[in-house]
Image (tube, helix red, strand yellow):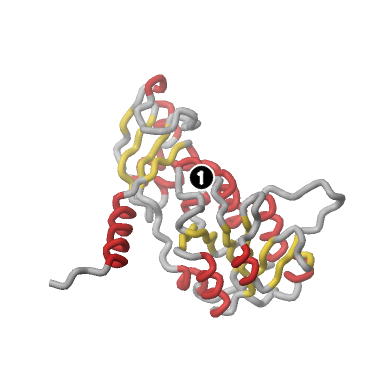
Amino acid sequence: MAKKPSWVIEKERGRRAAAAETVWLFGLHAVRDALMNPARVKLRLVLTKNAEDKLHDAIAVGGLEPEIADPRKFTAPLDPGSVHQGAALEVKPLDWGRLEDVALGDGGAAPRLVLLDQVTDPHNVGAILRSAEVFGARAVVAPARHAAPETGALAKTASGALERQPYLRVQNLGNAIEALKDMGYVVLGLDGEGEAEIGAVAATLTDRPVALVLGAEGPGLRARTRELCDHLVRIPATGAFGSLNVSNAAAVSLYAVRNL
């Protein structure tokens, strides 16, 4: 039998690792929405008696028998600082499918996407998922490495949006941008020194698919990411007081390009 190439072996290892990975969600909102999500693979539910009473209906839908824990000795393996509110749920990460399928969708209004260039703070990504859901973005896309993974902290900040708003991880963000452009997307990179205000550019793109690209706070967009964008745009500001947090910038940008 011929020996498998090393790249094939590494790919198979990655698939096995992903299949074995689990995530602990915590907090009443995050646990409730995950229990109600039929797409979630649910493995273990740990609740205090008080949390069980509050989540009674969701437990019935989720179909998982809870383990009742003493609030003073909560048995789920969470970080000590996690504000779990007496509720924790072990799950498999969600699989949202291929970028091509999500980006093309099934017709309707011109889609909007959010791409994150090395945004690693789970609280920022969670807040961006909430804004993406509110303003009707089709997905939030981030690289598989150097980005916030699906974690309990992210899910809690997203306040349920993680269960409904696609969060796709791609191997290479630059390649994903090129693929989106081939699908007809106009790619707008957020940059404080952008050539035009986002609202002015957005007004010309009401019938075009749009992908917003936001970089990490501080470094901003990487060089290749900037080069691949069709336009570098800025959010207008009054005075020279600094820049918005990336999650706030995402919300403002999504509002600017929203489909009415």
Q: Which of 51 and 119 is in front in this view?
A: 119
Instruction: Name the amino acid, label 1.
Output: Leu
In this view, the residue farthest toward the top is 72
Q: Which of 148 and 158 is in front in this view?
A: 148
Please provide percent x and percent y for residue 37: 41, 51
> Is 256 left or right of 140, judged from the image as shown?
right
Q: In this view, does 255 lie to the left or right of 39?
A: right
| Residue at (50% x, 49% y) in the render | 148
Residue at position x 78%, y 65% in the image = 197
Callout count: 1
Is 46 located above or below residue 236 in the figure? Answer: above
Q: In this view, does 248 lie above or below 174?
A: above
In this rendered view, identify the residue nearer to me: 136 or 129: 129
Q: Residue at x 67, y 60 (%)?
A: 254
**What is the secondary structure assignment of the residue under circle 1?**
helix
Residue 199 is drawn in which quadrant?
Answer: bottom right
Image quadrant containing the C terminus: bottom right
Could you tell me residue 36's position as x and y percent? Answer: 41, 48
Q: Quadrant of the N terminus?
A: bottom left
Question: In front here: 83 or 80?
Answer: 80
Q: Name the residue under label 1.
A: 154
Residue under the point 51% across and 71% down: 175
Left or right of residue 40: residue 105: right
Residue closest to the far left: 1
Residue 116 position within the rendered picture, expressed as x and y whole percent measured from the top left: 57, 58
- Which quadrant of the structure image shows residue 14? bottom left
Q: Is residue 65 above or below residue 137?
A: above
**Quadrant in which residue 50 is drawn:** top left
Across and down, in percent, residue 244 comes to 72, 49
Q: Give the crowd class for mark 1: few <14, some 14-19, many >=20 residues within 10 Å.
A: many
